[in-house]
Image (spheres, rainbow, N blue to C red):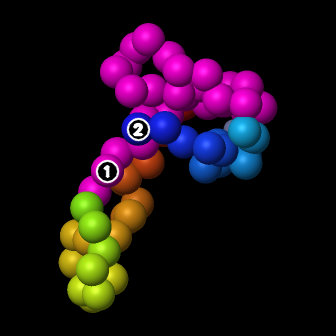
Amino acid sequence: MAVNACPYCGEDDLRPEPEPRGAWRCAGCTRVFVVTFVGLSVGGPVGAGASLRPGGLRGLE
Ligand SMILES: [Zn+2]
C-alpha cells in the first residue's frame, strides 16, 4: 500500500524497504513502518473495526 507522507513526522520522502514486506522507510525520521489496511468505514460506529485504529500503523522502532 502506497503512502504519501510519513505518519510520524509528515516527511514525504519515503522509500520502500525490502523487509518486512510492504514496509516504508522515512528519510526524515528514519522510522520503518508498515501500513495495514483495516477495512472500509461505511457509516458504522467508530471503533467497530471499520476505521483506522491504533495498531493499524505498526512502527518498527
Ligand atoms: Zn518520518
Quarter-wise, where is residue 13 in the image? Answer: top right
Verify CB contact (< 8 Å) between mark 2 and mark 1: yes
Residue 22 x %, y %: 39, 27
Is the CB of the residue bearing disc 1 within 8 angstroms of ligand 1? no
Closest to the observer, 56 or 37:
37
Instruction: Name the amino acid type tagged 2.
Output: Met
Rendered residue at 24%/86% (across/down): 44
Q: Is residue 18 above or below residue 7?
A: above
Q: Is residue 11 above or below residue 15?
A: below
Residue under circle 2? 1
Q: Which residues are magenta?
A: 13-38
Q: Is residue 17 magenta?
A: yes
Residue 35 x %, y %: 42, 42
Q: Is residue 61 magenta?
A: no
Mark 2: few/some/many CA within 10 Å (<14, 14-19, 20+): few
**Residue 61 as seen in the image, left or right of residue 28:** left
Mark 1: few/some/many CA within 10 Å (<14, 14-19, 20+): few
Q: Is residue 9 above or below residue 20?
A: below
Quadrant of the frame with the N terminus: top left
Residue 26 is at least partly visible in this image: yes
